[in-house]
Image (cartoon, rainbow, N blue to C red):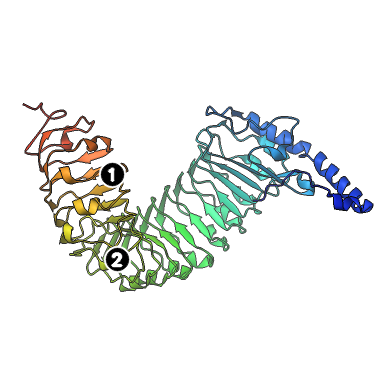
């Protein structure tokens, strides 16, 4: 979005030799120097400001908003139109301003974009003033604390090209009139408390490229209307209460769909083979559902997939051979797989950041696993497998590891030799064969579980509960009994 500059153009000495050109340039400079935002815009913005208390953090976001100054120079304001004098966008984000959205914004007749994001103290209902802004096209009111019902006549804002209300506290159902917003390319309502069925009228939004309804309480079956969206590239329906199968019309989104997340619902049945036709897909997330059967062989066609999450379902062997060029994040945990080994297409990845294969029937010596790249690894979860040996070599090759979970294996190593990098926050080595003395560096962790191993010695001063240290040979000291 362009912000109009109000600096004066310079009339060069060369132009001074041409009196008419120099005079025209001078008039233009004087006109631009005198230009300032329209009085209605200034009044509307100052009224908007009056709806807030001051930002308690250092330096208020609105401290430049002062009467008598050019509002086109105020922070978060951009202007366009004749000489750039009409406010066309408000952009305020990452602030602790407290208050509500004032109806005085109705004075900003040329406003086409309102961006109020990450304002945790912005409260109130859906702002009815939006209905009184005839040129408004882009609404991004995200990650605030607006609440109440979405207006039943929300569909009257037919000029909107993007509507995002994600991360607020709106409740009730999605109004069916939303299907009248036929110019929308983005509809984002995730992270609220919306309930009921997804209205079938959404099928009328044929220009959608982004549809996100995640983290609500929507229920019923997922509507079978996706053949209506030839431009859809991102679909997120995760963390709801949907049931039934993946609708067949989702197949019509191939090959352009790039992001599909249906995780954390109550979906059942087999994973449809048509997902293998989504050759542009970089993220596929179906975790925490009730999918059954084998993963389709057609998944081998997903050569551009970077993030694949099928965890916590009832999927069975065999797992298909993937021809992906480089997986970035993989989670197959807690299905009914018997992988026996970490797949070669994972071991060969040069961009792997998160590897979660808990309960996948893996049997190997961890010393002998030699991934091509470990530099980018943030998370490793190999819990509840049949893994022996030592993780020390692997962990000593990671510089930015955040979490390592390996409970319920047969790891045998001296914990003193394990490097705990500064970034590590989560460590679970419970129910293994680990021995030695706990290093002082564990005090910097956020979560620790080393129970049921063969550790001995004084426990460093930590805030972890006794259950984190239970079942060892001779650990002592708080929160266990004192050392003798």
Residue 332, by quadrant, is bottom left
From the top left corner, tell me how far across and down residue 58 is, in percent. Answer: 54, 28
Q: Foreground residue, 274 or 426?
A: 426
Q: Nearer the viewer, residue 232 or 157?
A: 232
Using a 10 Å C-alpha cutoff, classify the residue at mark 1 as few (fewer than 14 neighbours), some (14 to 19) or many (20 or more). Answer: some
Indicate which disc residue 421 carries. 1
Residue 80 left/right relative to 204: right
| Picture layout, residue 49 above or below residue 335 | above
Q: Which residue is mark 2?
A: 348
The residue under the point 63% across, 40% down is 76
Percent of width and height locating residue 329: 34, 58
Q: In the image, which disc is placed on residue 349?
A: none
Q: Is residue 21 visible?
A: yes
Q: SS of the residue at dot 2?
A: loop
Residue 366 horizontal/vertical position (percent): 17, 57
Rendered residue at 20%/53% (across/down):
393
Q: Residue at x 53, y 27 (%)?
A: 56
Residue 195 in the image: above or below residue 462: below
Answer with mark 1 or mark 2, whichever residue precedes in sequence. Answer: 2
- Determine if residue 383 is in view: no
Crowding at dot 2, Cα within 10 Å, few <14 / some 14-19 / many 20+, comes out as some
Q: Is residue 474 left or right of residue 94?
A: left
Q: Mark 1 to mark 2: distance in Å?
A: 24 Å
Q: Quadrant of residue 275?
A: bottom left
Q: Which numbered mark, 1 or 2, is in the foreground of this view? A: 1
Quarter of the rendering containing residue 425: top left
């Amino acid at each position: 979005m362009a912000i109009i500059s109000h600096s004066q153009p310079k009339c060069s000495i060369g132009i001074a030799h041409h009196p008419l050109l120099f005079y025209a340039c001078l008039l233009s400079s004087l006109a631009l120097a005198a230009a300032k935002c329209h009085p209605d815009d200034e009044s509307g913005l100052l009224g908007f400001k009056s709806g807030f208390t001051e930002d308690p953090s250092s330096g208020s976001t609105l401290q430049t908003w002062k009467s008598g100054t050019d509002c086109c120079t105020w922070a978060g304001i951009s202007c366009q139109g004749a000489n750039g004098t009409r406010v066309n966008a408000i952009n305020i984000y990452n602030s602790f301003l407290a208050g509500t959205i004032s109806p005085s914004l109705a004075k900003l007749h040329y406003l086409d974009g309102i961006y109020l994001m990450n304002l945790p103290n912005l409260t109130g209902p859906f702002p009815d003033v939006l209905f009184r802004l005839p040129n408004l096209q882009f609404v991004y009111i995200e990650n605030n604390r607006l609440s109440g019902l979405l207006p039943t006549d929300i569909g009257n804002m037919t000029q909107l090209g993007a509507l995002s209300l994600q991360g607020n506290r709106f409740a009730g159902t999605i109004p069916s009139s939303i299907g009248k917003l036929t110019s929308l390319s983005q509809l984002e309502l995730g992270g609220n408390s919306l309930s009921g069925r997804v209205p079938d009228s959404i099928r009328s939004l044929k220009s959608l490229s982004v549809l996100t309804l995640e983290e609500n309480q929507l229920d019923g079956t997922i509507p079978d209307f996706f053949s209506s969206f030839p431009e859809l590239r991102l679909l997120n329906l995760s963390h709801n209460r949907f049931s039934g199968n993946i609708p067949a019309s989702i197949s019509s989104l191939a090959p352009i769909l790039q992001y599909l997340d249906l995780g954390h619902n109550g979906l059942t049945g087999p994973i449809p083979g048509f997902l293998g036709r989504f050759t542009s897909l970089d993220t596929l997330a179906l975790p925490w559902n009730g999918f059954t059967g084998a993963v389709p062989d057609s998944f081998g066609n997903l050569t551009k997939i970077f993030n694949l999450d099928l965890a916590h379902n009832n999927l069975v062997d065999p797992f298909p051979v993937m021809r992906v060029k480089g997986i970035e994040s993989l989670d197959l945990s807690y299905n009914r797989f018997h992988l026996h080994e970490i797949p070669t297409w994972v071991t060969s990845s040069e961009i792997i950041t998160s590897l979660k294969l808990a309960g996948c029937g893996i049997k190997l010596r961890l010393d002998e696993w030699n991934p091509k790249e470990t530099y980018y690894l943030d998370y490793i979860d190999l819990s509840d497998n049949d893994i022996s040996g030592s993780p020390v070599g692997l962990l000593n090759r990671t510089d930015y590891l955040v979490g390592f979970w390996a409970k319920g294996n047969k790891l045998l190593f001296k914990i003193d030799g394990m490097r705990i990098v500064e970034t590590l926050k989560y460590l679970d080595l419970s129910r293994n064969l680990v021995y030695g003395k706990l290093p002082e560096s564990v005090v910097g962790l956020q979560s620790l579980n080393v129970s049921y191993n063969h550790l001995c010695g004084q426990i460093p001063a930590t805030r972890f509960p006794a259950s984190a240290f239970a079942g060892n040979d001779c650990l002592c000291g708080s929160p266990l009994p004192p050392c003798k």
